[in-house]
Image (spheres, grey):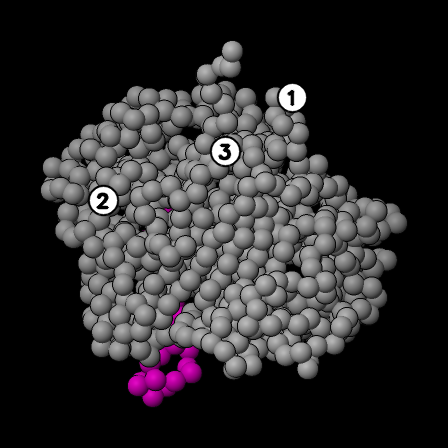
Amino acid sequence: MSSKSLVLATAAAVALLIHPAHAQAQSFVKCPPYGDTLLRVPELTRDPATKTLKAVMQVSDQQRMVWFPPATSAGTNGTIFCAAQHLRYFEGYSLTNPNEKWPVSNGLAEPLPGPTLRARVGDIIEISFFNEVNVTNFPNSLYFDRADRGQGTGCDETAGIYPSNASTGGAINDTYPNCFHGSSTANIHFHGTHTNPGSTGDNVLLEIRPTPRKNGAPVVTEQTYKDAFKTFFDQCEAELQHVPSGWPKLWGQLPEFYRTSQKQLLTDYDTTVTEPHKLWPPNQEAIDENEWPEFYIGAYPTCYQLPEYKQKPTSPAGLQMGQSPGTQWYHMHKHGSTTLNIANSLIGAFIIEGPYDDQLKDFYKSTPDHKNWGLADQVLVIQQVGVTPNLERGPNQQSAEELSINGRRQPVVTMKPGQVQLWRIVNGAHRSGVFFVAPNPSQIQWAQIAQDGVQLNVANYAAPVAGGASNGFLMSAGNRVDLLVRIPAGTPAGKYNIQALDVVKATEMPGGTAQKTPFTLITINVSAAGSSDPSPAMPFITPDKFPTFPEFLADIPQPKIHRDLVFMSTGHAAGANHTINGEKFGDTVDQSMILNTIEEWKIINETSDAASPGPIMHPFHIHINPFQIVEVFNPWDSTYVFTKASYVPGKNCFVDPTDPTTWHPCALTAIKPPYVWWDVFGMPGAREDPTGATTNVIKGYFVFRSRFSDYTGKYVLHCHILAHEDRGMMELVEVVPNTTVLKHH
């Protein structure tokens, strides 16, 4: 992505936002009750005959119910209200399964995630994507993208709060493009897909602007490109038989009608604006350089494959990857508005099935000896719904949005005594980590079987023994967990709550100095024992029947290439900056890796309790290739002591605050192989010398190894606290080819 293209990127909104709690009190309405039945979000599924998932998806907008904590000045602190707010949302339907669609009522709806996509390893994903957001529905708010009228090149603004808020006693150093902006522009990021990061694949550098409107109706509709997209998808299917492949690579490989139409739409738009707002010139520059253009209007075809692992003779041993079956997800990823769009619920689950699922279902199938068995599959998308990023709120609106699941708060899941269910949990919050508090094992038991859409090695699987404890676990923003949840036989009928903590900082974790009060996230309604209960009671899957571990997920050996990345956030007094290696996101490639190589990276967190904003656990995320964590140093781990007098060999570990050579894991905290695969990891927060003897900051860190396999191209890594990403805590990375036409003689 060139410097010029970033400068010419879709310009930002400049708006005056008035928080609903202050300006629209009359719009408050009674909230839906807590404890509704968990909503099963409709699914768009694959066509098994063609091994494709063919769907139409669009971004639309509608009045939806939003929960607001009122201002303390209103005299009702702690009371929860709801208000009708215009939100963007995903809707869609299947092109091959007519009954599969995600309709939204015309009335006041709950803030629901988008449709769940369900495909299989080896499938080709074909999505006709449309941006039909009507920006006139968002006057005088952050949503109104003034670039539609060629006004402004800077950041969104509010009533003296952001980006200039000297009245709070500090400053915010946000400058375009690392600020909240561009909220009407769309794209989709598919979390957990090992696939083409460019062209029509998992390309987050795209900017798809809303369709223009004539007499209020969209100019670009599904019919506009129906034939052109079918032609393209047919060709894409043929080309992607050569797996893995990054086709298409050139603009000229898109259908001529689409190319001609898009050029006309963009040049028509350019006649209404002046430099630097014009969009076709940077596209033409990219095309001339055989790069993929960034800007589109109204519609875009997404086509890529979920590659099935097939070792190629030409690939170095152990370097090729494949798509892992498991729980993935998708969300809008336009830099500058990821926070707002995810808060609006522009997210959805993406289930990719494979042998992992086949073997789980086979173990739990119902037979004459196992009556009423079967593995119920619950997809739970955690949401953090809101209409403004944190810095856009007034001083009394700083409370985090309430967490919900599938559009409902504290939803109820019904289970039978002796039953096991598979819970596929996605933390789609834009900010908060969720710590699941261990339940009473006599009532609820659970066993984790996958992390971030990659199954665990059976050596890392630990099912609770009868009466044994179930462990608590943290899901940072962006994480996924597959959980087998079991109700022991004989559990009395009744409702049992699963408690959680909303955590962002290390001090908010269990036992921390700022631990928050647990809240009910989910309720399990255990039905009365009856003839339909599983008989005998269903056990956790046994290690000998655990899903076969794919060979491409074998542990990565120690590589020769090593990199360090340092994440740091400062508070208002220091400019409120969010940086990686001291820099904000820019127009250069920050990390360049050679195709089909392995590397080891150390991700260091310098954000500490020594100053605002405190020991934030930045969730590190990199696209396309998952990684294995081989080392973690968390100075907040109670295993570490900081004085020699407290050191007991074999019981704890001594860290000397004056000696950085001791700031590393010890034998008690070392990670042993086989290693777990992740694509998001909440890095440990840094800690000021706990003894108070020095002002040294003990840095938290983790070390991962990754294979940069199969696909070349540009993509990003960033903090998954998305306000940090929007404001600069992101890097552009590129995997480059490992071949040349030159020959040695």
Q: Is residue 201 visible?
A: no
Q: In screen coordinates, is 271 left or right of 530? A: left
Percent x, y of residue 638: 65, 74
Q: What's the residue at 37%, 57% (across, down)? A: 582
Residue 398 vs residue 425, the one in the foreground: 398
SS at badge 3: strand
- Mark 1 nearby-residue class (10 Å; few <14, some 14–19, many ≥20): few
- The residue to which callout 2 is attached is 7
- The residue to which callout 1 is attached is 313
Specify the quadrant of the image occupied by residue 310.
top right
Quadrant occupied by the N terminus: top left
* Disc number placed over residue 594 in the picture, else none: 3
Percent x, y of residue 636: 58, 71
Specify the quadrant of the image occupied by residue 657.
bottom right
Q: Amino acid at mark 3?
A: Ile
592 versus 21 height, above or below: above
Q: What's the residue at 55%, 79% (across, down)? A: 690
Percent x, y of residue 178: 30, 55
Residues tagged 2 and 3 counted as in contact (Cβ below 8 A): no
Task: Give the farthest residue toward the right.
Answer: 369
Q: In screen coordinates, is 708 left or right of 26? A: right
Q: Amino acid at mark 1?
A: Pro
The residue segment tinted magenta is 57-80
- Mark 3 nearby-residue class (10 Å; few <14, some 14–19, many ≥20): some
